[in-house]
Image: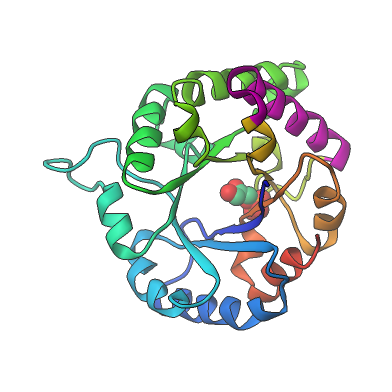
Amino acid sequence: MRKNIVAGNWKMNTTVAEGVELAKAVAAGSSEVPSSVELIIAPPFTHLVPVAEVVGGTRIGLSAQNCADKEKGAYTGEVSADMLVSAGCKYTILGHSERRQYYGETDATLVDKVKLAISKGLSPIFCVGENLDEREAGRHFDVVSEQIKNVLYTLSADEMAKVIIAYEPVWAIGTGKTATAAQAQEIHACIRKVVADKFGALAEEITILYGGSCKPGNAKELFACPDIDGGLIGGAALKAEDFIAIALSF
Ligand code: 13P
């Protein structure tokens, strides 16, 4: 059975002390959320260890926002999958559009990152999505299909079973513009079909999250769609109350 998940990507926000407080507030609010909904938070690297102490023993899963494409060694400034596991992470976001756009992350690098993360026991939250030009040119299905094929088609079925996909249209991230539920459902169904073309029935088990200006006010409509299994939340994840309200929208 595929899971319903609400994941908070804190991006480059909060100090360590603020992050610990936010994690405590999310943990306190999580008791209201039905156990059928999985909760994940993805703080910055510096926050992982103290936040792991806060969420340890709660139902909240810990995720990183990125992970190195190399196992270990002389790669100054990088953080490895082993380090994330040792800090208490079960997940890592990979291929976020901000990494692709501002830090030159390519599908080729992402193949290495996704495989390495899985081999170390992490579940990747693998992000795909088109930019505004691509959407306006009607190329969004092709762009997203290519992203999936270039990276996820290199995985075995056992590896693929560990992946969570997040569809995040770049034009909807932090802009206040959300994809309509119909637009999101249409592309989520396409993503599931592309996964099914390679992995067959496993596609039905894969969780596909929507991300991009998802808020308490629009989450219900989005989550009601048959191929939308939850959300990857940016701005609204920085307020525990909003994050929990989104998790209550199934
Ligand atoms: P916003 O919810 O701030 O639009 O960000 C979405 C996102 O990029 C989550 O990874």
Number of numbered discs present? 0
Q: Residue furthest left?
A: 74
Front residue of this view, candidates 115 and 17: 115
Rendered view: 108 above or below 70: above
Going 49% across and 42% down the picture, which residue do you hit?
162
Instruction: Tell me which residue sits at (64%, 23%) in the image.
Output: 200
When the figure is inspected, residue 115 is found, relative to residue 226, above or below; the finding is: above
Q: How is the image coloured?
A: rainbow
Q: Is residue 82 left or right of residue 184?
A: left
Residue at 36% from the left image edge and 64% from the top image edge: 88
Residue 124 placement (x, y as % from top left): 47, 43
For the C terminus, give its image quadrant. bottom right
Asked whether 32 or 66 is in front, the reply is 32
193 magenta-colored: yes
Q: Indicate left or right for 50 with 26 as reference.
A: left
Residue 120, position in %: x, y? 31, 46
Q: Position of residue 51 (x, y in %)?
A: 41, 73
The residue sitting at 68% across, 62% down in the picture is 37
**Residue 242, magenta (yes or no):** no
Closest to the observer: 85 or 65?
85
Q: Tell me, yes or no, if residue 79 can be seen here.
A: no
In magenta, the rendered stretch is: 180-201
Q: Which quadrant of the figure has residue 104?
A: top left
Q: Is residue 80 above or below residue 36?
A: above
Relative side of 21 to 68, left or right: right
Q: Is most of the magenta stretch helix, strand or loop?
A: helix
Q: Nearer the viewer, residue 109 or 163?
A: 163
Location of residue 219 in the rendering, given as x and y in whole percent from the top left corner: 80, 56
Would you say residue 53 is visible in this rendering? yes
